[in-house]
Image (tube, grey):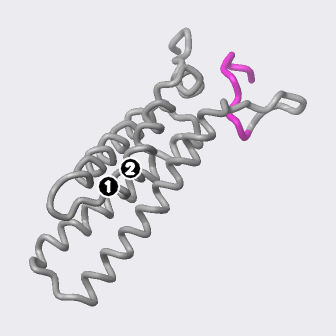
Amino acid sequence: MNTGQTPARGNAPEGAKPVQRPVFLLILTALLFAEGAMMVVVFAWLLVELITTKPTSTASAIAILVLAGIGVIWVLIAAIGSLLSKSWMRGAAVSWQLVQGAVAIGCFQGLYAQPALGWALLIPAIAGILLVISPSVTRATRHNPPAELP
């Protein structure tokens, strides 16, 4: 039965042309998965530090660990949404890049400033935002509702 809608990616009819993802969307997906992997490393490092050393404030250390865990989940969900070309991933990805940018700016300041770490966070954050707002990514992830409702 043909409903007039395009078949899902996994259910394409035989001989149909596979869906082509724009290069910028593939780069964005790779970037988000790389950021997700790095967040897993950060989370693991914070967990080991919490277990093996006595923090100045246990409550603060646990709060930072929970925030890192939320960050892991957030960026990996955005990466999966990007992989599936979902429209909602654009907002999730931009939100993540803004948080990452804010952390990067914090790395440039203060008594324990780490400019190298700041640049390592800021450059991918800016690249991620530019990729998300690129016309090809926006087009590929646009949600087009059906013309008529049943």
CB of mark 1 within 8 Å of CB of mark 2? yes
Residue 94 % position (x, y): 38, 36
Residue 3 colored magenta?
A: yes
Query: Which image quadrant for residue 110?
Result: bottom left
Q: Quadrant of the N terminus?
A: top right
Q: Main SS of the magenta segment? A: loop
Mark 2 lies on a secondary structure that is: helix
Residue 63 % position (x, y): 18, 67
Q: Is residue 7 above or below residue 40?
A: above
Q: Residue at x 36, y 76 (%)?
A: 45
Residue 6 % position (x, y): 69, 23
What is the residue that sits farthest to the right in this orientation? 15
Residue 113 % position (x, y): 23, 59
Callout 2 environment at 10 Å: few (<14), some (14 to 19), or many (20+)?
Answer: some
Q: Is residue 127 above or below residue 109?
A: above
Q: Residue at x 41, y 37 (%)?
A: 126
Which amino acid, by three-letter code, is at mark 1?
Pro
Residue 92 colored magenta?
A: no
Q: Is residue 110 above or below residue 87?
A: below
Residue at numbered disc 1: 115
Which amino acid, by three-letter code, is at mark 2?
Trp
Q: Residue at x 59, y 35 (%)?
A: 25
Tell me the magenta residue range.
1-10
Instruction: Residue 86: give its label.
Output: none
Residue at numbered disc 2: 119
The answer for how far apart the CA atoms under marks 1 and 2 are is 6 Å
Query: Which image quadrant for residue 95?
Result: top left
Q: Residue at x 84, y 28 (%)?
A: 16
